[in-house]
Image (cartoon, grey):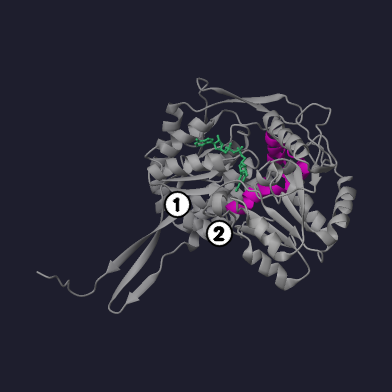
Amino acid sequence: MSQQPTASHFINGAYVEDTSGTPIQVIFPATGEVIATVYAATPQIVDQAIEAARAAQKQWAKMSGTERGRVLRRAADIMRERNHELSVLETYDTGKPLQETLVADATSGADALEYFGGLAATLTGEHIPLGEDWVYTVREPLGVCVGIGAWNYPTQIACWKGAPALACGNAMIFKPSETTPLCALKVAEILIEAGLPAGLYNVVQGLGDVGASLVTDPRVDKVSLTGSVPTGRKVYSAAAAGMKHVTMELGGKSPLIVFDDADLDNAVGGAINGNFYASGQVCSNGTRVFVQKGIKDAFLKRLAERMQSAVIGDPLDEATNFGPMVSASQMDIVKGYIAKGLDEGARLVAGGGQLERDGFYLEPTVFADVTDDMTIAREEIFGPVMAVLDFEDEAEVIARANATDFGLSAGVFTRDLSRAHRVIGALEAGSCFINSYNDAPVEAPFGGVKASGVGRENSKEAIQHYSQVKSVYVRMGDVEAAF
Ligand code: NAD
């Protein structure tokens, strides 16, 4: 593999190695081979990163938004120029097919850098007239922000957190998932090349304990986590103890509702995108596919036909459109759910097995006749397992779709415009789709409600979560006092 990062951590503008930390092997999911070893951050490395961030942040915050934005936009350009190299690295790190990574990872990271680079100069306060007196507000950075990533989108997550944080004048320390530690280092390298002053974007490696040490450090002002709900609960409560700001991008079990009048091929396409892209390892996936009874047979037939054209294979081959799971342990978790689906009486209509080849390959899997109480309809699987459930009418499907603690995403396929908006309006979810599924442009807020999260990434909304408002009352006359 070319262009590998040269050390485990990136602190104060340079690669830093410390082999006294716990070794973390990086495994190429398509073969099971070890492709790199990084070392978890020791307390000294964590301390170095926090001190570097603190030292650099104040000066960065004093620069104009235009100057900060220029750096981010340059970084976006470099990411686009290097898209191929970064996509190959993303494929090695995650196992996702190059066909996907070429269009969804560094490119999405570059979009975030460009978008927040553009917004940086527009982050102003307001003037509030009060007769003779007035109030003005100032939008200020939070200080040192910590980003903690999941393994499914390592480049994208590193940028989705880093870009708004930096645009607002903060410094960032990013801890990638221990499963995919490589890509964020490249983001750090590119930011420095684009002119970011040293210390503003640091990467430290490690497992949950390193994440926890960052979250509890009193020198850290904000924590943004992308991960599972159980981790979210721990990180949120640890951050609360220190009264820190948080963004929580957590898991889901999202409903995708297909009405009888839907365009069949679009609905099937939405269900495929919402279940099998990235081998199903996408938080917002529409894994509970509610299909109205009148269209059910046609839906399952068309789905089975289209699944024939899945090209499962080497993710580095651009013809491959379905790759391995990220790790042996994630594959085992998903196999456990498939076994549960069979045990609890769901009807397997496609896939269900592990491929006989090296690497962590599962077939794209579809269960039909799934009922709400089955484990595969209740728990996040985070793998290529679609559960198809039947429904009769609108009120029933809305109630069933909302009967979950999760609330990340929801989709509806129908040709009836009023129904589309009515149903989406009634669904308890943060990121919703009408006649589409899983689009995540940087311009749109992204995030969940209920247990799926707190705060929003992307769009102008993200600015609220990486800055705070100071209000200043200005009195023009004399101060009146009681005595
Ligand atoms: P995870 O919760 O196991 O780990 C996420 C990150 O948290 C890792 O970097 C891990 O090292 C760290 N961590 C673990 N314990 C910690 C602790 N106590 N303190 C601080 N950090 C800790 O999640 P995962 O398996 O890496 O990713 C899959 C999950 O992420 C799924 O649930 C998925 O839905 C979710 N996800 C959500 C989004 C979103 O934007 N909503 C996007 C991608 C993935």
The residue labelled by disc 2 is 118
Q: Is residue 193 above or below residue 271?
A: above
- Residue 296 coordinates in the image, percent (x, y): 84, 56
Q: Amino acid at mark 2?
A: Gly
Residue drawn at x 80%, y 44% is: 366
Horizontal side of residue 178 vs 199, given as left or right: right
- Circle 2: element type: helix
Q: Position of residue 88 (x, y in %)?
A: 72, 37
Amino acid, disc 1: Gly
Residue 348's spot in the image, x, y percent?
Answer: 83, 42
Q: Is residue 169 left or right of residue 179?
A: left
> Over which residues does the magenta segment extend?
84-113
Is residue 101 found left or right of 210 in the rendered image? right
Q: Position of residue 75 (x, y in %)?
A: 59, 48
Q: Quadrant of the C terminus?
A: bottom left
Q: Is residue 106 visible?
A: yes
The quarter of the rendering in which ligand 1 is drawn is top right
Between residues 424 and 44, which one lies in front from this camera angle? 424
Question: Does residue 11 appear in the picture of this structure?
Answer: no
Task: Please report contact status of discs 2 and 1: CB closer than 8 Å, yes or no.
Answer: no
Principal secondary structure, stretch drawn in magenta: helix
Q: Which residue is mark 1?
A: 169
**Is the CB of mark 2 within 8 Å of ligand 1?**
no
Q: Nearer the viewer, residue 8 or 264?
A: 264
Most foreground residue, 85 or 8 = 8
Q: CA distance from mark 2 to mark 1?
A: 14 Å
Q: Is 93 one of the magenta-colored residues?
A: yes
Q: Residue furthest bottom?
A: 131
Residue for point 67% across, 33% down: 3
Quadrant for the N terminus in the image: top right
Q: Who comes first in sequence, dot 2 or dot 1?
A: 2
101 inside magenta stretch: yes
